[in-house]
Amino acid sequence: METRTREIKAKKFPDISVRIIPGHFATRHSHINYFIDLTDVISHQKKAFAAGKAFASQYSSNTAVDTIVCLDGGEVVAAFMAEALSNIDRYAVNAGSDIAIVTPETNSAGQLILRDNTQNLVWGKNVVILAAQASTGKTLEQAIDYIRYYGGKVTGICAIFSAVDKVEGYTINALFTANDLPGYETHDMSDCPECAAGRKIDALVNNFGYSKLG
């Protein structure tokens, strides 16, 4: 499977790249025909810094950010994003701010939760959601509901990769989109053409990586 790997660069930010592998993969919500390997971006300092700076540029001039809610292991990118937002020139909206970074827990029912000691980081705050990747937008919808439940205001959504442009009226600022992957497809598990053709799943995938089957 790894022999099919190739690298693509972000169109607007060519110093940021990810590896992709074509195939037949199963996520929690869908079946997809590409695995997007975000390991370098979320784990290596230089690429994480570049991604955080790129995200910050989308919000520096017009969006208040008190808290960044991280999904799927994007804390390193979020830290660099917060630093870039607070260090931009004194005319920027968030200059000098001390931006919080929160990673919600997931309970046994799959719901996102905050403990009592961290709820104040969302309550009454301007919140940007940072996701590693979104194939259907369902996790982002859940995150929006979660922030509203805890009394926060969603002021932006960003993702390293997103196959959807908007969720509940919010534009997703993504470094990579489905347009960067030729022929990218996502299907409900019950309506997957690869499964209908009898092709086996190559791997189970999530934003932490993949586990090969067979």
Image: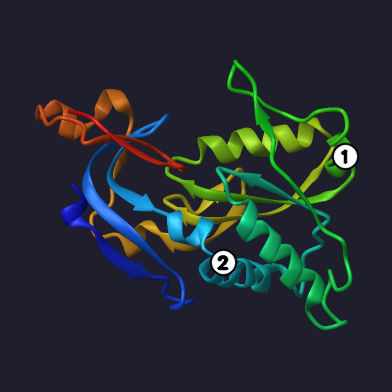
Name which residue lies at 23% across and 31% down.
Answer: 192
Name the amino acid type tagged 2: Gln
In the image: residue 61, left or right of residue 91 = left
The image shows residue 206 at horizontal and vertical percentages of 42, 38
Vertical relation: 68 (above or below) 71: below
Query: Dividing the picture into quarters, in which one does residue 99 lie?
Result: bottom right
**In what element is the residue under mark 1?**
loop
Query: Which tag is nearer the camera, tag 1 or tag 2?
Result: 2
Q: How is the image coloured?
A: rainbow
Would you call the spot at circle 2 few (<14 residues within 10 Å), some (14-19), or many (20 or more)? some
Query: Foreground residue, 130 or 142?
Result: 130
The residue most toward the top is 109
The image shows residue 77 at horizontal and vertical percentages of 61, 60
Vertical relation: 209 (above or below) 78: above
Q: Name the residue under label 1.
A: 123
Q: Quadrant of the C terminus?
A: top left
Vertical relation: 180 (above or below) 202: below
